[in-house]
Image (spheres, rainbow, N blue to C red):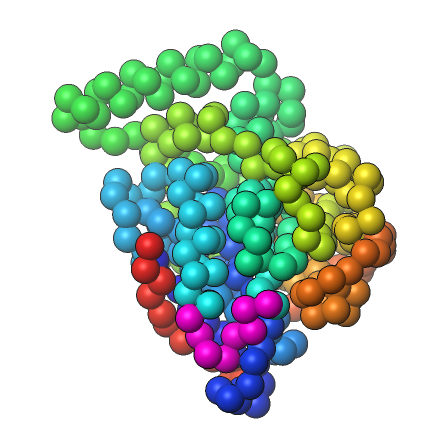
Amino acid sequence: MAANIFLPPGFDGQRKYPAVVVVHPGGGVKEQTAGVYAQRLAERGFVTLAFDASHQGASGGLPRLLDDPMKRVGDIYSAVDYLTTLSYVDNSRIGALGICAGSGHTIKATTTDRRIKAVATVSAVDVGAAFRKGWDGKGSVAEQLVALEAAAKQRTAEAAGAAPVFVPYVPNVGDKTAPLDLQEAADYYLTPRGQHPNAPNKMLLTSTNHMMAYTGFDQVETLLTQPVMIITELLVQGASTIWPELTIDDYAERTEQTMTAWSGMNGQQGGDPAKLATALVSLSEFRRASAALRCGRRRHRGGGGQAQDHPGTDRRSSRPLSVACAR
């Protein structure tokens, strides 16, 4: 696994710092929105780590561009493993932040790794549910079976030597037939605002089997006992991805361990650094409410503006250090 570590201003290697693993969206890499969140959180006093998922970006793994959600959960375990080896990280104050599809993986990892003491999500998506039910939540079992048949046919073809087939994560820029939030995602990931050569906007069609078998938000009622911060979108005309978040927000309604901020962001804007300032206000409040990632029992719903905070070059106070996290 390839990762970047960001250090706080005035970093002192003799001190102990709280740390956050930042998990990128499905088709993203560490240099995009995850890296920007990691940098900004480092400026607020955290040691942060943003990594490329296995099979993606600069990380290893064959076949390339396979999207296996459970492997991504394992990547989070490995990222926490690495943080625990750093003398300047306080192992009792390790948290995790997931963005879009990365949120589902982060929730899954947090329910099963007690070293993660608090978790935050931005525009959370359970990719397993999205594959089964469709982006609008209306998909049928018949449609699931068609997708699985196509994946089965392709796997057999590839086993016999056929070339792999890829499908896109987001539509082409300007595709008005796509849901609004996916159009916004394309406007970030496929334009100079967020494009990166290691993020080609495609995954293997044979990822379908792994996606269909995965559930990111199961067992939250029993195993997710850590403080949770959910930064979610507003339900507006044309946005379709709030339904996956409702699953995790229903949990938020039933527990005092959770804070939820309705941030004013629509859909994929939650993964867009142009909306980052709004999310960071909520994350900073969460940090205070959870006593620096150790405890917290408070619920909050707050509105947020459309503040601008664009990605920039590395700053001296939070310059990323490239590292390798062994699996």
Q: Nearer the viewer, residue 155 or 229?
A: 229
Residue 306 visible in the snapshot: yes
Residue 30 visible in the snapshot: no
Query: Residue 76's x, y, as percent?
Result: 47, 53
Residue shown at 59%/67% (left/top)?
92
Q: Is residue 61 above or below residue 134?
A: below
Residue 217's quadrant in the figure? top right
Residue shown at 80%/44% (left/top)?
255
Query: Residue 245's x, y, as percent?
Result: 69, 38
Total labels: the figure holds 0
Residue 240's quadrant in the figure? top right
Q: Residue furthest top?
A: 142
Query: Residue 73's x, y, as percent?
Result: 47, 46
Query: Residue 268's x, y, as percent?
Result: 62, 46
Q: Is residue 63 above or below residue 256?
A: above
Q: Is residue 325 magenta?
A: no
Q: Is residue 89 magenta?
A: yes
Residue shown at 51%/88% (left/top)?
14
Q: Residue furthest left?
A: 161
Q: Quadrant of the N terminus?
A: bottom left
Magenta-tinted stretch: 85-92
Q: Is residue 83 above or below residue 302?
A: below
Residue shown at 57%/53% (left/top)?
114
Q: Nearer the viewer, residue 235 or 92?
A: 92
Q: Nearer the viewer, residue 292 or 33?
A: 292
On screen, residue 162 versus residue 313, left or right, reads left
Q: Quadrant of the C terminus?
A: bottom left
